[in-house]
Image (tube, helix red, strand yellow):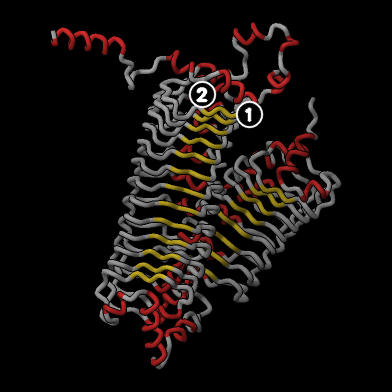
């Protein structure tokens, strides 16, 4: 009897049990998009379907603003349609959230959502994206993190308005070279993948402010990563890097660098990286804190060097006057310089795990304040303080920099020395030390020294501003790696035709010269992103496809204080220009009030004046 009752109970359970986990079918997914949600989305342009266990996207999402049969039946009588529900009051879908579901694929119909600006697909199980995603030309933010993606379709790189892209927590092994086509990107997160290399063209992403590449398998970084002039945060934690680019100082706006848990053996040259506030480079194999390093980072607040191989802290550490936290735990430091006590803002000094013999252990255990007091007391009895020694560093320099300085800084700096010529030997020395930056500004040069051409194959930056130049030599066209040229504040009237061969040039400054037009060769510089031509005598703007329209990467254009009498409306079609300065010219339209409102207002005004026929 008991056996029969148990059997009956099991039959009852199987028949009536509704399992908690079961495979969703299409009809169940479609029902998740209720009429209330549809109405709300049509009103706001925002549809949130996150966390609904969807295995497929409800069909209605792809044509949200089109009435279905049931709605048409209800609305046959137009008088019964509420004004707020009428099609003319609906907003196109601009923000779609499909995150935290179980989607394995995305239908090609996603390409129909032409007005979409934000798309969230994170925390799903996507293995691929449809090519049609490239149709979303207005998309500015895309989050596809926490999926199973290994590659992106070719059409993906048509998303030219994309500013935020999150690819983290996927299975990417490489980034395609087409990534550089997404030139509007400001934030790129590709952390927690299996990426072992970056494409060389990544340097074209000049608007990037954050680049997050942590937890990958990177062994090297492309040299042109230093061309990311807007970069403020660079995260390289947990990779296999053995070194950082030798000229990190090119990242002039970099504020935070995270490079913990790599195989880095030495600190790179940070000359010019004056915005850097935080440097986290613990758990590496660094043996030395170079003296030059301390001179180069006046605004550094946090320096994390724990778990390295450092044996000595140099006296020049005192030049890091903004330092708040210094962590040199778990190194091989045996003594501390008394100059540490001059760091007025230092509130955290981490020393544990070092064989320090110059300070008693009980003093170290008392913390930062006690250690600094001990060092300060010792400095008072020294015959010459380290501050005095530091103050004289760099005095009595020779007219021309020695090879050691060029080797460490990778630059030849001869600025403000009243030079009328530079010996060829100087450039030969610079070549032997692999100099990449040439700075001859603020001198009295009438012609570019011929010795400069010895650096044609390695130089990527040339600064000859504030001189007396009357011409530019043809040999400059041989500089195939040059990315920035500053020849402002000279007496130039033209540039040689061969100048257009500089395909790698990204920034050109010809301000404060005597140009009456933008030289035609400039329009051949297809990689140009910044053109500064203010304070000349330029009379017109050529915005045609053979003029500025040919510069598809141009983002910053400065034509202030010239003699421009008319602004062509088609300039407004060059939407890749994000900074435009036209003040101080003689045209009447656009009016000064519009110019004051900024680039977006100017471009909108110009587009409105383009003839419709």
Residue closest to the eye, 267 or 247: 267
x%, y% of residue 266? 34, 63
**Relative to 56, is 525 above or below?**
below
Q: Residue sitting at 47 percent across and 48 percent down?
A: 211
Q: Within the image, what quadrant is residue 41 found in?
A: top right
Q: Report the number of discs.
A: 2
Q: What secondary structure is marked by label 1?
A: helix
- Numbered circle sitting on residue 132: 2
> As rendered, which of 473 and 195 lies closer to the eye?
195
Residue at x-position 45% and y-position 80%:
342
Q: Earlier in the sequence, mark 2 or mark 1?
A: 1
Q: Which residue is mark 1?
A: 44
Q: Is any atom of residue 107 visible in this view?
A: yes
Q: What is the x, y in percent for residue 521?
A: 65, 47
Direction from residue 611 to residue 53 in the image, left or right: left
The outermost residue toward the front is 1
The crowding category of the residue bearing disc 2, from other C-alpha atoms within 10 Å (few below 14, some 14 to 19, many at least 20), is: some
Q: Is residue 6 left or right of residue 194?
A: left
Locate the N terminus by quadrant: top left
Q: Is residue 412 above or below residue 498?
A: below
Where does the image place residue 77, in percent across and percent down from the top left? 72, 7
Q: Quadrant of the C terminus?
A: top right
Position of residue 487 relative to residue 391, above or below, is above
């Amino acid at each position: 009897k008991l056996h029969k009752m148990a059997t009956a109970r099991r039959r009852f359970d199987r028949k009536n049990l509704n399992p908690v986990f079961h495979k969703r079918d299409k009809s169940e997914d479609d029902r998740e998009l209720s009429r209330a949600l549809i109405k709300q989305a049509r009103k706001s342009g925002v549809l949130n379907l996150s966390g609904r266990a969807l295995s497929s996207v409800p069909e209605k999402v792809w044509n949200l603003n089109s009435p279905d049969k049931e709605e048409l039946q209800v609305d046959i009588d137009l008088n019964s349609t509420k004004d707020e529900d009428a099609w003319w009051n609906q907003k196109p879908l601009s923000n779609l959230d499909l995150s935290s579901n179980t989607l394995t694929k995305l239908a090609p119909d996603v390409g129909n959502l032409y007005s979409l600006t934000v798309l969230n697909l994170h925390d799903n199980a996507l293995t691929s994206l449809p090519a049609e995603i490239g149709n979303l030309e207005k998309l500015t933010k895309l989050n596809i993190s926490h999926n199973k993606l290994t590659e992106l379709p070719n059409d993906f790189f048509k998303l030219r308005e994309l500013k935020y892209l999150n690819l983290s927590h996927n299975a990417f092994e490489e980034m395609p070279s087409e990534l550089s086509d997404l030139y509007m990107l400001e934030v790129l997160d590709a952390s927690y993948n299996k990426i072992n290399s970056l494409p060389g063209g990544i340097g074209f992403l000049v608007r990037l402010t954050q680049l997050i590449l942590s937890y990958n398998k990177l062994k090297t970084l492309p040299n042109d990563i230093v061309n990311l002039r807007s970069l403020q945060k660079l995260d390289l934690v947990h990779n296999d890097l053995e070194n950082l680019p030798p000229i990190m100082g090119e990242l002039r706006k970099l504020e935070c660098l995270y490079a913990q848990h790599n195989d880095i053996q030495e600190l790179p040259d940070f000359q010019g990286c004056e915005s850097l506030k935080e440097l986290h480079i613990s758990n590496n194999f660094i043996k030395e804190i170079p003296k030059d390093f301390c001179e180069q980072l006046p605004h550094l607040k946090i320096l994390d060097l724990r778990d390295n191989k450092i044996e000595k802290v140099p006296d020049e550490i005192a030049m890091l006057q903004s330092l708040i936290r210094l962590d040199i735990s778990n190194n091989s430091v045996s003594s501390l310089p008394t100059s540490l006590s001059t760091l007025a803002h230092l509130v955290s000094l981490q020393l544990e795990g070092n064989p320090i013999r110059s300070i008693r252990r009980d003093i170290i255990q008392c913390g930062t304040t006690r250690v600094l007091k001990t060092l300060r007391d010792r400095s008072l009895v020294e015959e010459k303080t380290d501050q005095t020694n530091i103050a004289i560093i760099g005095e009595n320099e020779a007219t021309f920099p020695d090879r050691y300085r060029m080797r460490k800084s990778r630059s030849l700096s001869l600025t403000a020395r009243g030079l009328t010529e530079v010996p060829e030997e100087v450039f030969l020395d610079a070549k032997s030390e692999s100099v990449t930056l040439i700075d001859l500004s603020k001198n009295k040069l009438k012609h570019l020294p011929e010795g400069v051409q010895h650096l044609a194959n390695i130089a990527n930056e040339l600064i000859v501003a504030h001189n007396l130049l009357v011409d530019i030599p043809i040999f400059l066209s041989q500089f195939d790696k040059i990315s920035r040229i500053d020849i402002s504040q000279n007496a130039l009237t033209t540039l040689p035709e061969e100048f257009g061969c500089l395909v790698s040039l990204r920034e050109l400054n010809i301000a404060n010269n005597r140009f009456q037009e933008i030289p035609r060769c400039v329009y051949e510089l297809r990689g140009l992103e910044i053109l500064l031509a203010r304070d000349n005598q330029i009379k017109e703007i050529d915005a045609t496809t053979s003029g500025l329209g040919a510069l598809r990467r141009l983002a910053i254009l400065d034509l202030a204080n010239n003699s421009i009498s008319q602004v062509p409306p088609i300039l407004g079609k060059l939407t890749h220009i994000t900074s435009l300065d036209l003040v101080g010219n003689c045209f009447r339209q656009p009016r000064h009030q519009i110019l004051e409102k900024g680039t977006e207002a100017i471009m909108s005004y110009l587009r409105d004046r383009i003839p419709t026929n």
